[in-house]
Amino acid sequence: MLYQRSSTLFAEAEQVIPGGVNSPVRAFKAVGGTPIFVKSAKGAYLYDEDGNRLIDYINSWGPMILGHAHEPVVTAITERAQLGTSFGMPTELETKIAQLAISMVPNVDKIRFVNSGTEACMSAIRLARGYTKRDKIIKFAGCYHGHSDSFLIQAGSGAITFGAPNSPGVTQGTAKDTLLANYNDVENVKALFDANPNEIAAIIVEPVAGNMGCVPPINGFLEQLRTLCDANGTLLIFDEVMTGFRLAKGGVQELFNIKADIVCFGKVIGGGLPVGAFAARNEIMNFLAPLGPVYQAGTLSGNPLAMAAGLAMLQELNDNPEVFSRLEEKTAYLEKGIRKVLTDNEIVFTINRVGSMISVHFDEHPVVDFQTAKNGDNETFKKFFHGLLNEGVYIAPSAYETWFITDALSYEDLDFTINAVNKVAKTL
Ligand SMILES: *Cc1c(COP(=O)(O)O)cnc(C)c1O
C-alpha cells in the first residue's frame, strides 16, 4: 500500500505541532515509519488520505466499541448540535447519562463527568486524598492512568520506598507521594503498606491492565488488594477508563465481582467524544465541591454534545447486552485463529486476552507484569506491525498496546485478519 499523501501531511504537521501529533503514540516512534492520516471511518474500517481501507483494531483506543460513525451516536450528536454546543449551565442530559451510568455500574451512587480519562484519574486521586486525609498513593508499574504528574512515576533507586519522576517537569516532591508496585505482586503491595503505615490514601489499578499489552489480574490479586485496602483504611480505585462499558456493562467490578471504592471512566463512556468520569458511593462523592471541600471543576465538563454521544452509546450497550458476549466470541475466534497460524509458522509468542481486549507478545514466557511485558521482541513486533499494515490491517503502533475489538467486525474481517497474520508470520 502507498502512503504518499499521509507522508506529505505528516511533514506539514511536524512544522507546526510537536512531533506532528497531539498524542505521542500516534507518531509511530516505537515502530518506525510515518503515521497514517485518516480521512474518514465507518464501521470496522478506516479510510486514509491515500484512499487505502484498513481494518481497525484500535478503534480510537477503545471508544468505538460498536464501530465508527455508529448511527445512533452520530444522530444524537447532530441533533444536539442544532440546539447549541455549550452553555456552562446544567442540562437534563447530564442527569440522564448519570442515571444510566449509575444503573449499569455496581457500587456507585453518584458520578461526576469530566473531559478525559486523565482528568478522571487525577480527580479520583485528589478525592481519595481529601477523603482519607492522607497523601500517598500506590500505583503499579506499567499501568497508565493518564498524564497527570502523580502518575508519571517510575521505580526510584529504592523502589520499595518511593518512586522517581519519569518525565522532566514532574517534581521530586510529587514523586515521593507515589509508591510503585509490580502488577500481580501482592507481597510487594504489603511491603509498601508496612513501610508506610496509615499514610496510603489509595491504591489505583487497572483491574485488567491494558497499557502494557493486555495483562489480566492473576487469581486473587484484586481480591487481596480489596482486603489490604479494608485493613488499612485505604480506598481502592479501579481505573476502568479502558475496561469500563467494554468487558461488561458494569466493567471489571461486575466481571470479577469485586467492589472498588472509586471507579474512573473514559473512552467508551464518551461514544467517541472527549468524556471522562469518576464515580463512588455517596459518602465519598459528597466530599466533592460544591457539597464538600475537595475542589474539582470544568468549563466544558458535561458538554451537551459529549453527553449526547455518551448517552447514545450507553443506551445502545444497555439495551443490547448481547454485545458483550458477541465481542467475547469474536475476539476468542480471532485469538484461536492467530494462535494457530503463529504456531504453524513456528513463531515464539504469548497471547493475552480478556473479553474484547487482546495482545500478541513475541516472547514465550507468560506476560504478567511490566517486566515480563518488556521481554517481548520489539524487532519482531515492528515487522509484524508493518506487515499487517501492508495487508490493510491496522493494529496499535506499539507492542505495549492492547487491540480493541469492535462489534462492527464481521467474521469475514476476522478471517481476512487471520490470513494476513499468516502471510506476515512467514516473513518474521
Ligand atoms: C486511556 C487511559 C487513560 C487516560 O485517558 P485519556 O482520555 O487519554 O486522558 C487513563 N487510564 C487508562 C486505563 C487508560 O487506558
Image (cartoon, grey):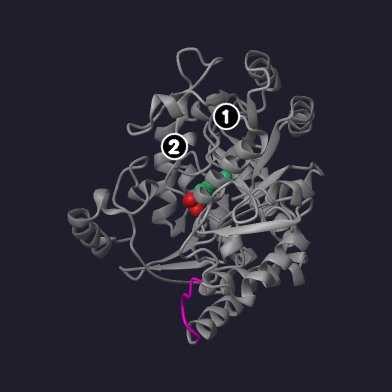
What residue is disc 1 on?
A: 135
Q: In the picture provided, is 389 more to the left or to the right than 203?
A: left
Q: Secondary structure at mark 2?
A: helix
Q: In the picture provided, is 57 more to the left or to the right than 285?
A: left
Q: In the picture provided, is 396 more to the left or to the right than 100?
A: left
Q: Secondary structure at mark 1?
A: loop
Q: Position of residue 122 (x, y in %)?
A: 53, 44
Mark 2 or 1, closer to the camera: 1
Q: CA distance from mark 2 to mark 1?
A: 14 Å
Label 2, ligand 1: CB separation under 8 Å: no
Q: In the picture provided, is 321 more to the left or to the right than 155?
A: right
The type of residue carrying mark 2 is Asp
Please report the residue visible at 76 percent of the width from the left and 72 percent of the height from the top: 319
Please name whichever residue, 231 or 319, is drawn nearer the observer in this view of the structure: 231
The stretch of residues the image draws in magenta is 83-88
Q: Position of residue 30 (x, y in %)?
A: 37, 40
Q: What secondary structure is the stretch in magenta mostly built from?
A: loop
Quarter where residue 200 is shown: top right
Q: Position of residue 138 (x, y in %)?
A: 60, 28
What residue is disc 2 on?
A: 149
Please name whichever residue, 123 or 420, is drawn nearer the observer in this view of the structure: 123
Please report the residue visible at 50 percent of the width from the left and 48 percent of the height from the top: 118
